[in-house]
Amino acid sequence: MEALPEGVDIGDYVFAFEIVLSDPELKSNMQLLDLPGKNDVALSANHLQKLHLSFLLTTPLGKPFKPHQHIFVVENTGKQFKITLDFLGLVEKFFYLSGQCDIELTVGDAVMENSFLQLLGSIELDLPKAPEKATQPPPQVVSPYLRFGPKAEINHIFRVPEKRPPQEVSYAFLGLVLVPLLTFLVGLLRLGVNFKNFPTSAVPATFAILFHGGIAAVLLLYVLFWLKLDLFTTLKTLGLLGIFLMFVGHRTFLTLPQQQPS
């Protein structure tokens, strides 16, 4: 250190911290703290008072030093860094909770060998009562380490299955579902359907096969709906099959007069 030139500003820096509690009607209460010595600040304030915090860093040559990073400092006067806590504007952030609050100071840097966290004292706040529509404070944690401990076991409660209808009702519904199919088969037998009038030409025969295949696909869709498909999927598929059947059925019925003998 002695070999360095006199202009090199290096050595022990002086850190001064100041707390001022001001009142619009009373005199200010100022305390200059000795850091990192022992301090026991005990203040009391209401929502009409303000708390001023300031600190000053001085180099070995007596020049003010601006730190690389400082938290909650909103004003720089050139020498001091200050912050003013107006409790009237902070009552909502304090959730209108009166009581004792600790004042702690943290000083540290990447190149500091003696960074420290020091309790400076406490301040007793007397805030007004919360209005009816005020925001409720969050639940207080008994210990900050509990956030990282084992959590309580979550027991899932499953919904009780709905009561099924009687077996007779299920069989009756099955019979109603099969009525259209039985009606279709009986109609085929009563009409005496045969394959004599089935188209023999390539194009009419293709449309006729597609038409009958579409009807079979609709019947298969009913079976799949009964086994695993839901109502919305069945209706969408049935709509597409209906459009297909309308097109090929129209072309099939147009060829029927051509197949009949004149």
Image: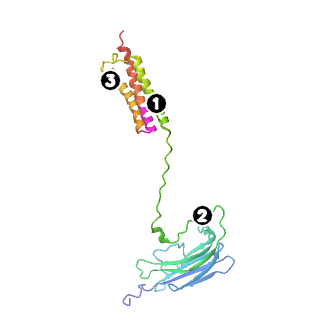
Nearest the viewer among 15 and 149 is: 149
Residue 206's label in the rendered image is 3
Q: What element carries label 2?
A: loop
Residues at marks 3 and 1, CA–CA distance in whole angstroms? 35 Å
Residue type at tag 2 = Gln
Residue occupying image coordinates x 60% and y 64%: 136
**Residue bearing the label numbered 1:** 175
In the displayed structure image, the side of residue 241 where residue 39 appears, left or right:
right
Q: Is mark 3 on a helix, strand or loop?
A: helix
Residue 14, x across and y down, in percent: 48, 85
Residues at marks 2 and 1, CA–CA distance in whole angstroms? 61 Å
Residue occupying image coordinates x 42% and y 20%: 187
Residue type at tag 3 = Thr
Mark 3 or mark 1, which is nearer to you? Answer: 1
Question: Relative to 132, does residue 211 appear above or below in the rendering?
Answer: above
Residue 233, x across and y down, in percent: 43, 38
